[in-house]
Amino acid sequence: MRIPLLAANWKMNMTRREARVMVEDLLARVGDLRDREAAICPPFHLLSEVGSLLAARPSIRLGGQDLYWKDSGAFTGEVSAPMLRDVGCHFVIVGHSERRALFGETDSSCAQKVTAAQNHGLVPILCVGETLEEREAGRTQERVVSQLRGALQGLALDSGERLVVAYEPIWAIGTGKTDSPEEANRTMSLLRATLAELFGERIAAQVRLLYGGSVKPENIDAFMACREIDGALVGGASLKAESFARIIQFQ
Ligand code: PGA
């Protein structure tokens, strides 16, 4: 069955020193993970540092926050899938709502990134989610299904273990508001049904679906109790060892 995944998205936070202190503290708190996996997606300048600290803990993986779809070349400021592999990444976040809203990411650029990640053995964590206006207009399901289809367009997937999808209602990110676990579960079951249409039931049943948006120690257990929720993508609460450790140790 699907192994729960608790992934930290540090966004544009942390110096090398802060990262070292946080990861050492986290490792001391969580011990070896047996029935779950965690991941840390730090900003690019910390990948090597955090990767070395995590080397002795294979159940806590390293991830990038974005990538470009070309392997190398004249693309100033970008980083490629082979580069992320080279520094030890297992995951890469694709299409986070901040990238879509602030940096012009589209479903078609996400599709190219998902393909590039998979061609190089990285597991993309593809993010989808609706705005508050879409939510209030009753368009959540239509929105997230169209983002999912758009970003997975043309993809050949032979195992659902090679893909993670994060459902993050945009109005819940960094706001302290969360979707109700029941509502999130309903939306995520629709995402799984869409994956089944695209890739077949067997593969859809292997894809891990994460909830994201103001996940905290206080609410993680309720989300993890839902059938379709296989983990969480955590921003703010992943910056402190104590709170991310509690999220990893959900019950
Ligand atoms: P948050 O961010 O946990 O701070 O709401 C989640 C995310 O953006 O992935």
Image (cartoon, grey):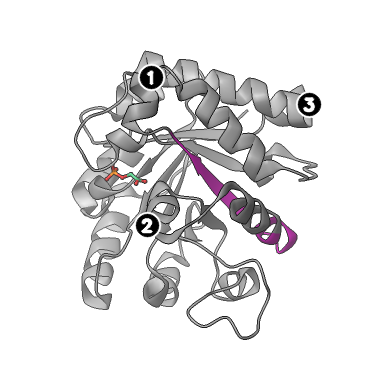
- Indicate yes or no: mark 3 CB to ligand 1 under 8 Å: no
Camera-side mark, 1 or 2: 1
Viewport quadrant of the C terminus: top left
Instruction: Say left or right for 209 vs 29.
Output: right
Q: Is residue 122 visible?
A: no
**Residue 123 lies in the magenta-colored region:** yes
Disc 2 marks a residue whose amino acid type is: Leu
Q: Is residue 244 visible?
A: yes
Q: Residues within 10 Å of mark 1 (few under 14, many from 20)?
A: few
Q: Residue at x 27, y 76 (%)?
A: 16
Q: Tell me the CA gap for discs 2 and 3.
A: 34 Å
Determine the image quadrant of residue 54.
bottom left
Residue, disc 2: 102
**Viewer-nearest residue: 156 or 47:** 156
Camera-side mark, 2 or 3: 2
Residue, disc 1: 137
Residue range corresponding to the magenta coloring: 116-129
**Residue 91 x %, y %:** 55, 56
Disc 3 marks a residue whose amino acid type is: Gly
Disc 1 marks a residue whose amino acid type is: Ala
Mark linked to residue 200:
3
